[in-house]
Image: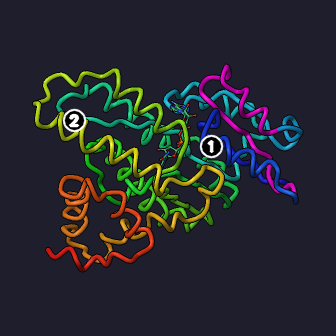
Amino acid sequence: APRTVLISGCSSGIGLELAVQLAHDPRQRYQVVATMRDLGKKGALEAAAGEALGQTLAVAQLDVCSDESVAQCLSCIQGGEVDVLVNNAGVGLVGPLEGLSLAAMQNVFDTNFFGAVRLVRAVLPGMKKRRKGHIVVVSSVMGLQGVVFNEVYAASKFALEGFFESLAVQLLQFNIFITLVEPGPVVTDFEGKLLEQVSTADFPDTDPDTLHYFRDFYLPASRELFRSVGQSPQDVAQTNARYTPLAALKAVDPSGSLYVRTSHRLLFRWTRFLNLGLRCLACGCLRIRIWPR
Ligand code: NAD
């Protein structure tokens, strides 16, 4: 029988692509429940799903921040059985910390972290009873390393990593497996939404120097990063080899100092060479040892 796959956040981006790819599996191994918070946005998914719609793909409402919504969604799945859960829904938050509200920060944790926890708690009893299941978590490279002006978003992804790494140990006893996916920059609506957020925010209580670093260093560098090493949601299931050298800095120097200093130099000292620097990092020709500690 096909496996029931429940995916959160399917109105756009990675969730939409994953839902469509699984629903089009030539061997029809999956029955996809593609969920989204606002069913008014289901048009793009339905168009991309094509003839899979109503066959191997069903669309359902699910707000990962609501217990009622999660319960309602699971009650509509035949037998309530989810074989594979994909925690994909997520929101970003960028900007100088002093200028962001605590409510905005809490919303990031409510969605990215507690949203995933809420879904896992709901499907886990069934998976444990059946002694079978797979939980996939769309984390981020920012779950492995911090990125300037993304402190709260990175913290929410670090939280996911710690939570699921801990849970994975127990769940092996139940034959339930966890996969953490850590994409680098992916060209989706995600970046556009963040830039829109930034263009309308005035970041109160932020000193001029910090605002200058954010607007004149970070934002152009971020755009360049997406342009030069961003991958498409279609191939996000595979490793983004182009981002690997940056991620590897932390493994090379477990103290974390090499990564922090390299990021700092790339952004604040070498902005003019950022493009070149990223390309060199991408092809590996710029050896990390030319940045002495
Ligand atoms: P996206 O904005 O296209 O997708 C995020 C989805 O989550 C949207 O459909 C949004 O509506 C949904 N969502 C937000 N709050 C929700 C809620 N309360 N309930 C249900 N759905 C909700 O962006 P994306 O790039 O496809 O992001 C998908 C995941 O990938 C996110 O977890 C994100 O953190 C992660 N990620 C993205 C990138 C990137 O560069 N785009 C990189 C690494 C990881």
Q: Is residue 257 left or right of residue 38?
A: left
Residue 252 image offset from top left, x and y in percent:
30, 77
Q: 93 above or below 6?
A: above
Label 1 neighbourhood size at 10 Å, few (<14), some (14-19), many (20+)?
Answer: many
Q: Is residue 247 magenta?
A: no
Which quadrant of the figure has residue 94?
A: top left
* Rendering quarter of residue 253: bottom left
Q: How many marks?
A: 2
Distance in Å between CA atoms under marks 2 and 1? 29 Å
Q: Residue 231, image x and y in percent? A: 55, 54
Residue in view at x 66 percent, y 27 percent: 61
Assign the C terminus to one quadrant of the image. bottom left
Residue drawn at (66%, 24%), measured in percent from left and top? 41
Disc 2, ligand 1: is the CB inside 8 Å?
Answer: no
Which quadrant: the N terminus? bottom right
Looking at the rendered image, the disc whose residue lies closer to the viewer, 2 or 1, is 2
Instruction: Residue at 52%, 58% (x, y): give it.
Output: 181
Residue in front for this viewpoint, 292 or 58 = 292
Beta carbon of the mark 1 residue lies under 8 A of ligand 1: yes
Relative to 113, is 158 above or below? below
- Residue 15, labelled with which disc? 1
In the image, the segment drawn in magenta is 27-49
Q: Amino acid at mark 1?
A: Gly
Which residue is labeled 2 in the image? 96
Label 1: state its secondary structure: helix
Can you give x and y, in whole percent of width and height, for residue 32 in the image? 76, 44
Residue 147 lies left or right of residue 118; in this view the side is: left
As displayed, is residue 104 above or below residue 284?
above
Q: Is residue 102 left or right of residue 51?
A: left
Q: Residue at x 46, y 31 (%)?
A: 193
Depth check: give the residue in front, 161 or 258: 258
- Under circle 2, the secondary element is loop
